[in-house]
Amino acid sequence: MCMNRMADPLIRVQGVSYAYRVREGKSIPVLHGVSFEVHEGEHLAIIGHNGSGKSTLAKHLNGLIVPDAGDVLVDGMNTRDKRSLREIRKRVGMVFQHPDNQMVATIVEDDVAFGLENLGVPEDEMRRRVDEALRAVGMEAHRDRPPHHLSGGQKQRVAIAGILAMRPRCIVLDEATSMLDSYGRQELMEVIGRLHGEGIAIVSITHHMAEVALADRVLVMEAGRIVMEGTPREVFRRRDALVALQLDVPGAARVASLVHEARPDFREDRILASEVVEEVVRLAPRRG
């Protein structure tokens, strides 16, 4: 996806620090002076082991949490300004880890329409947006079904449809695939790939490195700070540093590294399964 880095960023995180209050006079620092930007149409992945602060950071991106220090600006609006929160959340939608916790209605299409009803969107416009959103995630045939009859992957697609109906410019996925089986995860990532291709910015908080390999850019977090940044290929090249942070690289990258040791002409920087297959084909003996 082509991104205009010369334009103002969609989201600007400036020196954000945050601590959870556990009891009077006691707090647990989670974020320490975090700064980065999210650009229009970008797919940004944020990774880190449990407790690194990535999910807390995600909740700052549309004002669910307000920083103790620093600022988060969404399209120029500060999340500290309560008057701007409705507009901010139109632009940046969140999909969380547990699909069941996101369902608020007894019928799929009513769930997708929920946010629009709260905004007072006229009925004709609401119906048009719900139809478009369900079509975008491939759930039109399930519009009259109760959400509890759906698979985990289908529920996450409904959650995304509810956000799409709001016409967002960015979707934040906070471990949205972690509770899904491999089929549900693949199903959801195909939807995300299509939305990214249509120009919606994606911020993906995940521990699945095969998903990270699909991003445009990666931030690596440790103890509430960004400790590494780059394209997936640049980040995964630093495997020893990732292992020291209790992280790994995609399976395809491990395979490429192992084959490279035996066949130095096999490119070591392959990080996608499709790239490994292409490299095998390239080096396979020609017949005839």
Image (cartoon, helix red, strand yellow):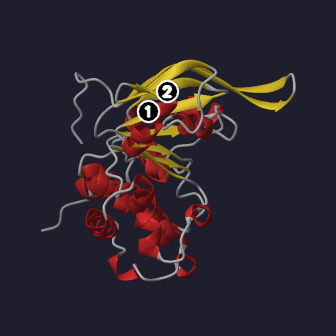
Q: Which residue is mark 2?
A: 81
**In the figure, is residue 129 to the left or right of 55?**
left
Expressed as whole percent of the image width and height from the top left, the position of residue 60 reads: 54, 34
In the foreground, 67 or 270: 67
Of residues 239 and 246, the one nearer the viewer is: 246
**Is the residue 25 above or below the residue 45 in the image?**
above
Choose between 208 and 194: the one closer to the eye.
194
Who's the residue at 51% across and 32% down the image? Answer: 82
With 204 as the anchor, is 245 left or right in this view?
right
| Residue 135, placed above or below residue 42 | below
Percent of width and height locating residue 255: 46, 51
- For residue 278, what is the image quadrant? bottom left
- Toward which corner of the image does residue 152 lie, by quadrant? bottom right
Residue occupying the point 34% across, 58% down: 165
* Above or below 181: residue 115: above
Tell me the number on the disc at residue 15: none
What element does badge 2 sit on? loop
Q: Residues within 10 Å of mark 1 (few under 14, many from 20)?
A: some
Assign a secondary structure to mark 1. Answer: helix
Three-letter residue code for mark 1: Ser
x and y percentages locating residue 24 in the rendered image: 87, 26
Tell me the kind of residue under disc 2: Asp
Which residue is at a point 30% across and 49% down the rendered structure image? 196
Image quadrant in which the C terminus is located: bottom left
The residue labelled by disc 1 is 84
Tell me residue 44's x, y (percent). Answer: 40, 38
Q: Measuring 58% from the left and 30% from the top, which residue is drawn there?
A: 221
Disc 2 to disc 1, how far (Cα)?
Answer: 6 Å
Residue 69 visible from this viewpoint: yes
Image quadrant occupied by the N terminus: top left
